[in-house]
Image (cartoon, rainbow, N blue to C red):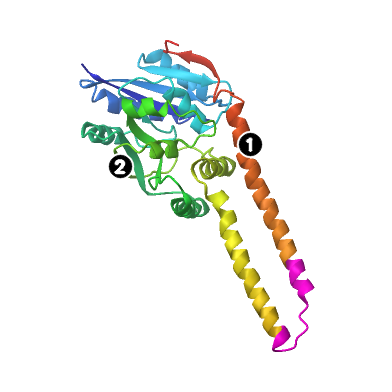
């Protein structure tokens, strides 16, 4: 019996890339159709351009293509989850629609799966990003590796292969604020990598804005790390040391040098600094409270407005 492969492609404002990624993926999958059955699933994440129309054109011609249309833009991680929760095939490969995830790697990833690996990541060797984005990403991963309770592989995105066992485990994770890369890393299945040079986008700039990247970073920090809470202990120790230093310094000046030290100046500076610090930690505390509230109100992660090729 043939094994079954699902290719998941979330798309947001990718009207010019849809046909390119489809044709490239179709070519690769057709070359192994003697060994594997396959399907290509497009998830339109509330695009307001012609992305949905392009997906419909493909679906009308190819019975191996399925699609989901979300009612609005729920963001990339929720769009991926929409298919993961419906998937049931033997191999699931997720990739972006912008052609920066080369479909040719599908063959290498399947070969690794045949070697009994359960998760296969496509790992970027080189990035063709702009200077600021490239080096903020490097700094971001360095910071995460230091403070995370769960270690994520470096230089990987959502171009990955998982098997059915990993999929079933993923379906048990119910949190609302999702960072899927960390969720798979947290499960810690047998993992390997396929390295590649990431090409530049063919059409347009990425729609993954700084706002979305900052939200993703916050989701990771607050969902997979207790470091923001531990900062209080670090600052408490620092304050004790700083207070002892000032006490000894003032004592020495008063008893040895007979200097009338203007302590009120230092007190004012310290009070202002603590006021600023208090607002920072109040913000962090409210972020945690918001996530508790978000988990308890039971809203769905996404809403599907249309679908084709699914039983339910």
Circle 1 — which element?
A: helix
- Residue 193 spot, x, y in % from top left: 30, 42
Circle 2 — which element?
A: strand
Magenta span: 254-269
- Viewer-proximal residue among 149 and 27: 149
| Residue 259 included in the magenta stretch of the image | yes
Q: Residues within 10 Å of mark 2 (few under 14, many from 20)?
A: some
| Residue found 48% across the figure and 19% down from its top | 68
* Mark sitting on residue 290: 1
- Residue 25 spot, x, y in % from top left: 34, 28
| Residue 186 included in the magenta stretch of the image | no
Q: Distance between the residues labelled 2 and 1?
A: 36 Å
| Residue found 64% across the figure and 44% down from its top | 285
Q: Which residue lies furthest to the bottom in this view?
A: 257
Q: Residue 2, relative to residue 49: is it above or below?
A: above
In the image, 280: left or right of 74? Answer: right
Q: Residue 170, relative to residue 264: is it above or below?
A: above
**Residue linked to disc 2:** 193
Q: Quadrant of the C terminus?
A: top left
- Viewer-proximal residue among 212 and 252: 252
- Residue 185 spot, x, y in % from top left: 39, 40
Sequence-earlier tag: 2 or 1: 2
In the image, 36: left or right of 290? Answer: left
Q: Quadrant of the N terminus?
A: top left
Q: Is residue 7 visible?
A: yes
Nearer to us of marks 2 and 1 is: 1
- Residue 162 spot, x, y in % from top left: 33, 31
* Mark sitting on residue 260: none
């Amino acid at each position: 019996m043939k094994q079954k492969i699902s290719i998941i492609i979330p798309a947001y404002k990718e009207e010019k890339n849809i046909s390119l990624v489809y044709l490239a993926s179709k070519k690769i999958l057709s070359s192994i159709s003697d060994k594997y059955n396959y399907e290509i699933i497009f998830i339109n994440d509330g695009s307001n351009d012609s992305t949905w129309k392009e997906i419909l054109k493909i679906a009308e011609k190819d019975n191996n293509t399925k699609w989901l249309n979300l009612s609005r833009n729920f963001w990339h991680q929720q769009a991926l989850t929409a298919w993961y929760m419906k998937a049931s095939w033997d191999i699931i490969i997720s990739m972006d629609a912008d052609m920066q995830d080369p479909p040719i790697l599908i063959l290498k990833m399947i070969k690794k799966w045949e070697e009994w690996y359960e998760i296969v990541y496509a790992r970027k060797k080189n990035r063709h990003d702009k200077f600021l984005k490239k080096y903020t990403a490097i700094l971001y991963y360095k910071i995460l590796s230091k403070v995370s309770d769960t270690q994520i592989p470096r230089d990987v995105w959502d171009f990955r292969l998982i098997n059915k066992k990993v999929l079933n485990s993923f379906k048990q994770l119910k949190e609302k604020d999702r960072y899927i890369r960390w969720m798979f890393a947290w499960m810690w299945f047998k993992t390997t990598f396929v390295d590649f040079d990431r090409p530049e986008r063919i059409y347009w700039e990425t729609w993954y804005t700084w706002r979305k990247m900052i939200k993703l970073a916050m989701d990771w920090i607050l969902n997979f790390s207790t470091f923001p809470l531990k900062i209080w202990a670090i600052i408490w120790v620092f304050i004790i040391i700083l207070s002892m230093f000032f006490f000894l310094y003032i004592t020495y000046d008063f008893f040895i040098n007979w200097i009338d030290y203007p302590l009120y100046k230092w007190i004012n500076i310290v009070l202002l600094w603590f006021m600023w610090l208090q607002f920072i930690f109040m913000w962090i505390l409210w972020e945690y409270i918001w996530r508790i509230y978000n988990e308890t109100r039971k809203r769905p992660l996404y809403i599907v407005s249309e679908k084709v090729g699914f039983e339910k």
